């Protein structure tokens, strides 16, 4: 299971790579836990000056592993791994850069709202089908998406579950740039290395000034998580998740 998240250091850049290609990088509780630990340890290590998130060719992440959701929806209990990861994202002290290729669903989209720079390829599609699954937005996206996209753009993404192509995402300010598939990793790592070379204290202050107060973001994630937990145990979500899993097996 641990090889589903690969952690690598290149100079002052820490790379967190989701590596579960057979499941299109659907995230399990163990994967969340390893990413949380990497962010926390990297923030505490003065040798690390930037974090990078990468996926595999064609799949950044297809979102949370729905089997985990279904366990909770049918009466089981979940752990704190997702919450811990969302807190690590919201409270990350060092710049985060992401490189997205292909599928970016659910947390595969909302993770990038926390990043300081996101690069994507032309074949990337950002989508958050929370409502379709009887669920609600997560990861602070109900706050962050509205700040980035405006109210109607945020509703299109989070309420309608509309897919945003890479070009549309760039035009809307959701991502920084669109680059070719074979140039993605190089562009991401070059940007992260440039960030890592900046005077760290000046950069930290500048980044903090550009970000919303952490308290507001954490409070919103808490409210979202409470609703999300309630919705996971609802008849509506249980029926939607069961139907979706049946279609996948069919």
Image: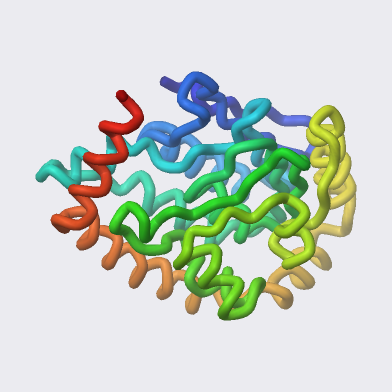
- Position of residue 28 in the picture relative to residue 18 (left or right): left
Residue at x 42% of width, y 38% of height: 33
Look at the image and tell me in which quarter the N terminus lies.
top left
Q: Nearer the viewer, residue 142 or 28?
A: 142
Across and down, in percent, residue 171 comes to 78, 64
- Position of residue 126 in the picture relative to residue 176 (left or right): left
Across and down, in percent, residue 61 comes to 54, 38
Across and down, in percent, residue 242 comes to 22, 40
Across and down, in percent, residue 51 comes to 68, 45
Residue at x 85% of width, y 46% of height: 191
Q: Nearer the viewer, residue 59 or 42?
A: 59
Residue at x 70% of width, y 45% of height: 98
Query: Does residue 94 sit above or below 248 in this rendering?
Result: below
Q: Nearer the viewer, residue 97 or 124?
A: 124
Query: Does residue 3 sit above or below 99 in this rendering?
Result: above
Q: Nearer the viewer, residue 51 or 107?
A: 107
Query: Does residue 89 sit above or below 58 in this rendering?
Result: below
Look at the image and tell me in which quarter the C terminus lies.
top left
- Position of residue 212 in the picture relative to residue 67 (left or right): right
Residue at x 88% of width, y 40% of height: 190
- Position of residue 73 in the picture relative to residue 124 (left or right): left
Q: How is the image coloured?
A: rainbow
């Amino acid at each position: 299971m641990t090889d589903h998240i690969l952690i690598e250091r290149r100079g002052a850049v820490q790379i967190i790579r989701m590596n579960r290609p057979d499941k299109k990088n659907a995230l399990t509780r163990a994967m969340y836990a390893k990413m949380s630990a990497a962010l926390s340890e990297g923030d505490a290590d003065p040798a690390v000056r930037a974090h990078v998130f990468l996926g595999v060719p064609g799949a950044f992440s297809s979102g949370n592993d729905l089997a985990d959701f279904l366990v909770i929806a049918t009466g089981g209990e979940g752990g704190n791994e997702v919450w811990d990861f969302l807190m690590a994202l919201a409270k990350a002290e060092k710049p985060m850069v992401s490189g997205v290729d292909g599928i970016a669903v659910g947390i595969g989209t909302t993770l990038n709202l926390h990043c300081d720079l996101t690069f994507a390829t032309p074949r990337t599609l950002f989508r958050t089908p929370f409502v379709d699954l009887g669920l609600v937005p997560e990861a602070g996206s109900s706050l962050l998406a509205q700040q980035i996209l405006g109210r109607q753009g945020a509703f299109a993404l989070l309420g309608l579950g509309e897919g945003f192509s890479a070009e549309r995402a760039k035009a809307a300010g959701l991502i920084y740039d669109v680059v070719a598939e074979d140039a993605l990793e190089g562009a991401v790592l070059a940007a992260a290395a440039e960030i890592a070379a900046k005077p760290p204290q000046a950069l930290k202050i500048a980044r903090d000034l550009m970000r919303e107060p952490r308290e507001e973001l954490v409070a919103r994630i808490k409210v979202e998580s409470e609703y999300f937990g309630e919705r996971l145990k609802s008849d509506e979500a249980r029926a939607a998740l069961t139907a979706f899993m049946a279609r996948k097996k069919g």
